Image: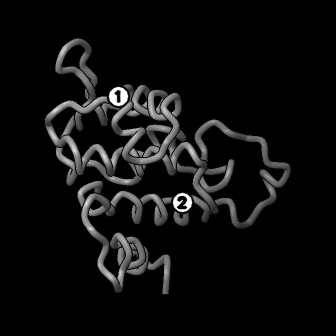
Amino acid sequence: MRLSNLADYAVVLMSAAARQCGSVPIHAGMLAEQTGIPGPTAQKLVSHLARAGLLVASRGSGGGVRLARPAAAISVADIIEAVEGPIALTSCVAEGRHDCSLEGSCKVQPHWGVVNGAVRGALQEISLATLSVAPAKSSPMGLSTSLEANGILQ
């Protein structure tokens, strides 16, 4: 299981925005420069994240982007879903998808919702505020602790 580059970059960009701007607007170009994300990609991400209600963009002098709500109220799941859509580990978990050749005879399909919910729940527990501070040595960015607490890692 791996995030797309775009989802990964969205988390990096939002983390930089949380560290840099809080409620003060910052230009997408500055975020691109600070993170190493290519400018056009940063601009595309800003559009996705603003449409999802995670960033607020303003034009003109003093314009830029800022977080739409406090970093503690934005989760990794929110950011990933802003770029990728709903988190769905398999196609049978995604609403309206019926493209699995095993559909109808699969004995595991009824359980994928639980697995998917556990992964999404773990990502929902990790806030942007957590990602915006220096990681602890024993638990980088709190991710393994959150995954352990949700029974995903043992």
Quarter in which the N terminus is drawn: bottom right
In depth, the one of 88 and 142 nearer the eye is 142
Please tell me whether residue 71 is drawn above or below residue 49 in the rendered image.
below
- Residue 54 appears at what percent x and percent y? 31, 36
At 40% from the left and 40% from the top, the residue drawn is 33
For the residue marked with disc 1, what is the amino acid? Ala
Residue 108, quarter of picture = bottom right
At 55% from the left and 43% from the top, the residue drawn is 6
Residue sitting at the far front? 33
In depth, the one of 18 and 152 nearer the eye is 18
- Residue 106 appears at what percent x and percent y? 77, 61
In depth, the one of 19 and 143 nearer the eye is 19
Residue sitting at the far right? 101
Which structural element holds mark 2? Answer: helix
Residue sitting at the far top? 60
For the residue marked with disc 2, what is the amino acid? Asn
- Residue 2 appears at what percent x and percent y? 62, 59
**Circle nearer the N terminus (2, 1):** 1
Q: Is residue 17 left or right of residue 29?
A: left
Q: Is residue 106 left or right of residue 120?
A: right
The coloring applied to the image is one colour
In the rendered image, which residue does mark 1 sit on? 50
Please tell me whether residue 12 is drawn above or below residue 64 in the rendered image.
below
- As drawn, the label of residue 116 is 2
